Image: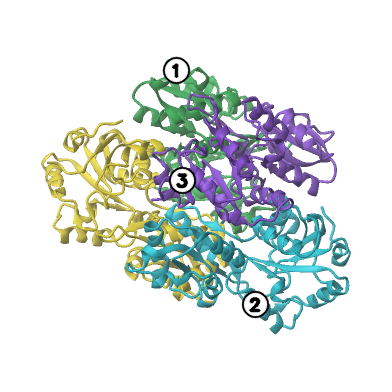
Chain colours: A purple, B green, C yellow, D cyan
Amino acid sequence: MIELAGFRNIVDQYKIIFFDAFGVLKNYNGLVPGIEKTFDYLASQNKEYYIVTNDASRSPQELAETYHKMGLKAITQDRIVSSGMLAKEYLDLKVNNGIVAYLGTNSSAHYIDSSGLHTLPVSAINYTNIDQVNALVLLDDEGFNWFDDLNKTINLLRKRTIPAIVANTDNTYPLSGNNEVAIAIGGIASMIESIVGKRFIRFGKPDSQLFMFAYDLIRARMDITKRDILMVGDTLHTDIIGANKFGLDTVLVLTGNTLPDDAEMRIRTTGIMPTFICNDAVVE
Amino acid sequence: MIELAGFRNIVDQYKIIFFDAFGVLKNYNGLVPGIEKTFDYLASQNKEYYIVTNDASRSPQELAETYHKMGLKAITQDRIVSSGMLAKEYLDLKVNNGIVAYLGTNSSAHYIDSSGLHTLPVSAINYTNIDQVNALVLLDDEGFNWFDDLNKTINLLRKRTIPAIVANTDNTYPLSGNNEVAIAIGGIASMIESIVGKRFIRFGKPDSQLFMFAYDLIRARMDITKRDILMVGDTLHTDIIGANKFGLDTVLVLTGNTLPDDAEMRIRTTGIMPTFICNDAVVE
Amino acid sequence: MIELAGFRNIVDQYKIIFFDAFGVLKNYNGLVPGIEKTFDYLASQNKEYYIVTNDASRSPQELAETYHKMGLKAITQDRIVSSGMLAKEYLDLKVNNGIVAYLGTNSSAHYIDSSGLHTLPVSAINYTNIDQVNALVLLDDEGFNWFDDLNKTINLLRKRTIPAIVANTDNTYPLSGNNEVAIAIGGIASMIESIVGKRFIRFGKPDSQLFMFAYDLIRARMDITKRDILMVGDTLHTDIIGANKFGLDTVLVLTGNTLPDDAEMRIRTTGIMPTFICNDAVVE
Amino acid sequence: MIELAGFRNIVDQYKIIFFDAFGVLKNYNGLVPGIEKTFDYLASQNKEYYIVTNDASRSPQELAETYHKMGLKAITQDRIVSSGMLAKEYLDLKVNNGIVAYLGTNSSAHYIDSSGLHTLPVSAINYTNIDQVNALVLLDDEGFNWFDDLNKTINLLRKRTIPAIVANTDNTYPLSGNNEVAIAIGGIASMIESIVGKRFIRFGKPDSQLFMFAYDLIRARMDITKRDILMVGDTLHTDIIGANKFGLDTVLVLTGNTLPDDAEMRIRTTGIMPTFICNDAVVE
């Protein structure tokens, strides 16, 4: 079995650190205790870092603000790479006109709206405008009536041959404090995809496109290779397998989805092996 | 390719006829035109018949009443075998006490209620009674708030190791007249099963247990073999493959899910072959 | 958690006992030590028993002989219900003429041969006889050249719209002594089914049809209900969930697939709950 | 429905053309008639092109030679981007020492061998060297004994927690002339993955990493964006959905997997929509 290692010693071997957000930097109680010291250390060592997250519910700016409110000023919007940004890039490149229907909050839609298309919630699609709908985007599990709008979504996809984009591949997300979870838009997307029998376009870890997006942002500013990057994550089947396949070294931390008692068994049964395992991503 | 055959000639070769309900006897416009003549003919020939249906939304008595209202008196409650009856048998045999939580209408729950257990909608489960919940039954897509109660269902199954019974395996059902569909409880069940990673117990075609249930009812009254029975259905992947595997001969009719233009292609691509194909189940 | 219980006390509550074979009565070292005492006890108490097994590699007579050679005379061929018997019943009822192509040993084919059809190994199918092939049966992982005959099978199923029957749903089986496994015909069947995109007909636990077959054999001789039967198995996702769904009470024993240390975790993660758990099926 | 368009007019709108190989440039009869004119035209217009192919059975040099033998000199090894190259990059980046076991021909292994690791066929793995195996690569369906070596592979993956890399995601490939197919290593990989329950690492379309690899090769030499690239393919669920998701415009050609009569139906049922449809990729 891989030995538990000190996070500082590992970080010292790389120029750029990618962090997953939930379970690594924060959890439902707020910031992981001591995590601000990690970013102080990265600054002192002139290391680059990015938050690479399957979160399409808000814009990078809004995501950054949530860290600032918790007292972590180091995470600015230009340091955040989210699956929502890939959805937006897709719409920019591939959908030229018409309506983009969405499932999610107004806030999540506001973000993709900037690409100049006309965004409308699924609830506002009707027989007068359905022929102009050229894409469907699934952004968030909140902001719509599940019974009405999921049934409406099924029938929209039966009538229109359009791309359906899922900007978050997670099935659930944790709720505060009590070990409960909520169904995420990724879980709902799988149900709809299976019912209509069409192929959806999914952005987010473990898919390598999100890592590539972050990699490209860095290469625009400095000359690096994949060997210079370390991915830090708490989830084997998204963070670790995704970064591993992209060619990055990885750290599994035990502050989120993977519990200390389960790590070894999960690695053995899934065959997904991180380069390192650490208790947490805190530089003491 | 199998030739289109006359339904009367086929029926003459069997003692007992099993009918699927939706797409064979009725559709969203009401009865299939002329279907009452089929039941007159069966009566004149002293042939037995059963309606074998994936419908757990109502009791056999209520299902029979819907036929009576449309003018088909031949379908009485003792002729109906539904997947809901299997769910009820399961609860009778395997769950001895405590609460059965359900998703569905009050009417659907009233039916399984008769087994003597305490049935409660998922919305009524809370920290005071969750430890007494000994089974979950998914009955109907209506009668509950999807957002609240599907999230509650996920967490119920994370906390309690209990059987989860799905009394309808269909993913969707057709809505009246406009070629639209609605998500059925079977589609919702697959999403929940996938999210919690547990194995659900499913009753309904194509599973052979529903055919066996009907077969047992008949054998209690008369001496027959599987060769005496003909299954009439409109859906290859439920009616036809299920009855076929159970050892029954089958008729595919083209008044429901399988359109005349698609039948040959669908049979070839799925490999599911009915014994006969007829335009409809009407004896002229 | 369910307490470990004594097997004798449990057996005393039922009239008929169904046993899985591998992992319950025997393993790769031979008989489970002391298991003959269980059958002495059943005889002394006038209890009925059946071996309910996913084994289509040999006839019930040949299977019985393997027990006799190991010294267990109580298991006679009329006590064995195998998934191969369901495959044979299917061919008897549903395939009237022509060639049945098979993958497996000659010995396995000899058994289904008795239904009067012409059985030929896939390797003997060629352009002169392919049009007469009316069914394909997958019986055993041995007795054919995988590369040649699996490729030939794919193309047979692309050319002929015929039923494909799988008489063993297991993916692997254990090899002697060294914790290694071999790929079973059920695992190969899933690959072929996925590649050709057609629906195969599978016989064997957890499907309820095998339990029904055994139940019918008993009811032909005595008057019983499902409450009188206990299923004893070592595998949650075949023996336990299958019997449970059919309405039988179940014992999980820890002499096979489910190790003592894993039982509780596996029950919790799969949601498949046996009525009882025992160390083994030995009546001391 | 999208109108059939002239290939030349489409090509004129882009700077770089990506071509799938089989079904676009060649088929089992040799080159697609007239395809050499396309490359003459691209040269005359100073357009760049790459062959982007799910082929790990040979090195780019050997692949290029097969085109030269057929008379197409324009395809040189530096123009070929294959899924085998991604497998090789993965081994270079992520596996530092020890043995790489493989399934495939010696020729396919020779290619990945260059990364300095010790490559051995699965047949050569035994108890003396199994502890040094640090990766498994599935390269080709030929070059090994399926029965012996697939069973050996299963047990290797049960004993060693190592990455398993699949360098070709296709399930089947066409055989010459007679409408028959052969099982590809991608189909075998899915069976093994399902049996051992571990997550394999797959390289090849539709995964975006192959498109990214090609994109990076071009950007090292010239300044382009995704809008400058056109992907030409014959398969909706690999070429078209993959390039589309990566943000490229696409042409579906009807000289391979997608037949002219099926194109519209397949696009509608899968929801995968190309930017253009052409009869072939020939510039007249």
Circles 1 and 3 on the same chain: no
Tell me what residue is drawn at x 72 percent, y 42 percent.
A85
Q: Chain of mark 1?
A: B
* Position of the N terminus of chain C by quadrant: top left
Residue B127: which disc? Answer: 1
* D248 with respect to C125 (left or right): right
Task: Look at mark 2 in the image and give the residue it sits on.
Answer: D61
**Outermost residue to the top:** B128
C183 w.r.t. B148: above or below: below
Tell me what residue is drawn at x 67 percent, y 81 percent.
D65
Task: Look at mark 3 in the image and give the residue it sits on.
Answer: A277
B281 w.r.t. D60: above or below: above
Could you say which is closer to the camera, residue D12 or residue B195?
A: D12
* D204 with respect to A90 (left or right): left
Secondary element at tag 3: strand
Secondary element at tag 1: loop
Three-letter code, disc 3: Ile
Question: Residue D103: percent from the left, percent from the top?
Answer: 48, 69
Circles 2 and 1 on the same chain: no
